[in-house]
Image: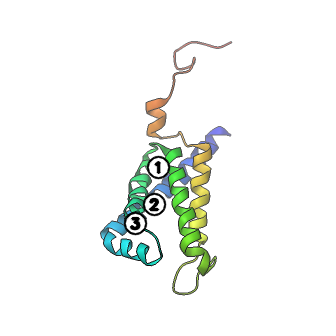
Amino acid sequence: MKNKFEVSTLILRVILGVSFFIHGLVKFQGGIENIAGWFESIGLPGALAYVVAFVEMVGGLAVVIGLGTRIVSVLLSLVMIGAIIKVKLAVGFLGNGQMAGYELDLAFLAMAVVIAINGSNIFALDHLIFNKPTNRNKGNTVA
């Protein structure tokens, strides 16, 4: 049962990480200055656009490789909460024809919260770096 859980969280982790990485990358490729201007137009500091894009891109990559997964997932959750409250809530769950709704943001938020709560050890760099040896790993047998 535990193996199924680990595989499931790995799938969530990789999909979430790749999705955020691409969203962050697009912000930089499309002209982060434009995103900063848009942030200012909705009443947010323009510099926040750089922070959000960085968290999305670098955080997305970190989640994929399993480095700081829980902490990064909390940061990604905060980004999604901000996006939903500040921008998407006003356009509704499915959007208004001009802007997408918050359905995808809510799905990303749920995925990030699950990973923040449960972690994900399978194929995770954190697990390789910080895994403490158990009796089984030391070659000792437990009766």
Residue depicted at x 68% and y 40%: 1
Q: Which residue is mark 3?
A: 49
Cα separation, mark 1 vs mark 2, equals 9 Å
Most foreground residue, 91 or 130: 91
**Residue 87, located in which quarter of the rendered image?**
bottom right
Residue 31 visible within the image: no
Q: Position of residue 112 (x, y in %)?
A: 56, 54
Q: Position of residue 92 (x, y in %)?
A: 63, 79
Secondary structure at badge 3 equals: helix
* Nearer-N-terminus badge (1/2): 2
Where residue 20 is drawn, which disc sits there?
Answer: 2
Secondary structure at badge 1 equals: helix
The reply to whether dot 2 and dot 3 touch (C-beta < 8 Å) is: no
Cα separation, mark 2 vs mark 3, equals 14 Å
Instruction: Establish if 52 lies above or below 142.
Output: below
Residue type, mark 2 in image: Phe
Most foreground residue, 45 or 133: 45
Secondary structure at badge 2 equals: helix
> Does residue 47 appear left or right of residue 9 in this picture?
left
Q: Crowding near pointer 2: few (<14 within 10 Å), some, many (20+)?
A: many
Q: Position of residue 28 (x, y in %)?
A: 32, 66
Residue depicted at x 47% and y 74%: 43
Residue depicted at x 46% and y 44%: 66
Where residue 110 is drawn, which disc sits there?
Answer: none
Residue depicted at x 62% and y 45%: 117
Residue type, mark 3 in image: Ala
The reply to whether dot 1 and dot 2 touch (C-beta < 8 Å) is: yes
Residue type, mark 1 in image: Val
Q: Which residue is mark 1?
A: 63
How many numbered marks does the figure carry?
Answer: 3
Residue 67 visible within the image: yes
